[in-house]
Amino acid sequence: MSSRRQAAARLGVLALVTALTLAAADYPDVLPGAEVHLPADAGAHPLFRTEWWYVTGWLATGSGEPLGFQVTFFRTRPDGDAANPSAFAARQVLIAHAAVSDPKRQRLWHDQRILRAGFGLAAAATARTDVHLKDWSLAEQGEVFTTEVRAEGFGFALTLRPSVPPLRNGAGGYSQKGPAAASASLYYSLPQLAVTGTLERGGHAEKVTGSAWLDHEWSSAYLDAAAVGWDWVGLNLEGGAALMAFRIRDAEGTPRWAGGTLRAADGAVRILWPAELRFTPGRRWRSPRTQVEYPVEWQLQAGDLMLELKPLMDDQESDSRLTTGAVYWEGAVEARSAGQRLGRGYLELTGYGERLRLR
């Protein structure tokens, strides 16, 4: 990102912070018994503190070149005075991250945006999946999703077609994230999305195809005071199966909580509880920019399933300090067992440099 754009982004963050008052917002809890109801819950939930729509996937060019991509739209409700009549009051803030993992060039193309909702520039609809920040967007149109990103040096316009039903994570969508019942989110996924579209890098556009995964999650108390970050993976497995698994870590790296959902190719769903999941870190990679060290290879036990996770490329670190304040590793990975590929997906590693603070 150019120095001019960095300065503008810093000024934007400063303006958002300045716009906030000292009044505390009243955020609803996610408690046991809460459920995801679709399609009603596909849109935004503006009373909750934090929400995101998260699309990750693998792409292939016409020549077979593999690429990873991700785009995430965050909505956050900051502390503030809801009665403030000013149109400039930051009642909702929208953030977007986008990246393309490019192993041929050994480059992660990455960009980010932040805007307060309003003025026709940024919005998240409540009736359906439809979120945008200027010319970045994710929208549901009939039975398909479209996402468009026009970033610095890269961009994409993709169509995502569901091939399997939505997957509610946890008990009907209630996904616990810590020992306390209120440390939780409402959470569903759309795995096995068929992708077609166009990808641009360095001014060159080409057709791509692939598969993707869409997560939608909202919460007011995602991480408790003892948690510093998480390890998460979403995998499209061979034959139409899908696996989501995560663990929450404390400051010593000890698992504080874990959970997951495994859907077999025949549609049978198994909820995975903390005792059924084991994340064992393997080879590590140190970022030359931040000096943060990440375990980029893993052994994952999810119930009876034993997997080895290997990255498409090591350098998939995203620096989002100009928007969310976080530095994290988020990248395309292959899942293997006994040397055979069983699936592909994305791995996210947060809280390795410093404690993750959701805003």
Image (cartoon, grey):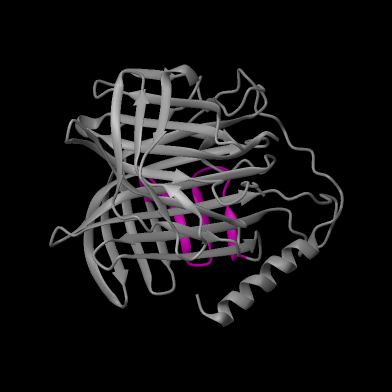
Q: Which residues are magenta?
A: 120-145
Q: Is residue 326 among what the camera can see?
A: yes
Relative height, residue 153 to residue 272 (above, below)? below
Residue 259: % across, % down: 48, 25
Identify which residue is drawn at 80% across, 43% down: 25
Residue 85: % across, % down: 84, 58
Identify which residue is drawn at 42% across, 64% down: 149
Residue 15: % across, % down: 74, 68
Residue 166: % across, % down: 39, 31
> With 246 as the anchor, is 264 left or right in this view?
left
Identify which residue is drawn at 35% across, 64% down: 156
In the rendered image, the residue lying farthest to the bottom is: 4
Does 356 appear in magenta? no
Does 127 appear in magenta? yes
Relative height, residue 262 to residue 19 (above, below)? above
> With 201 as the anchor, is 96 left or right in this view?
right
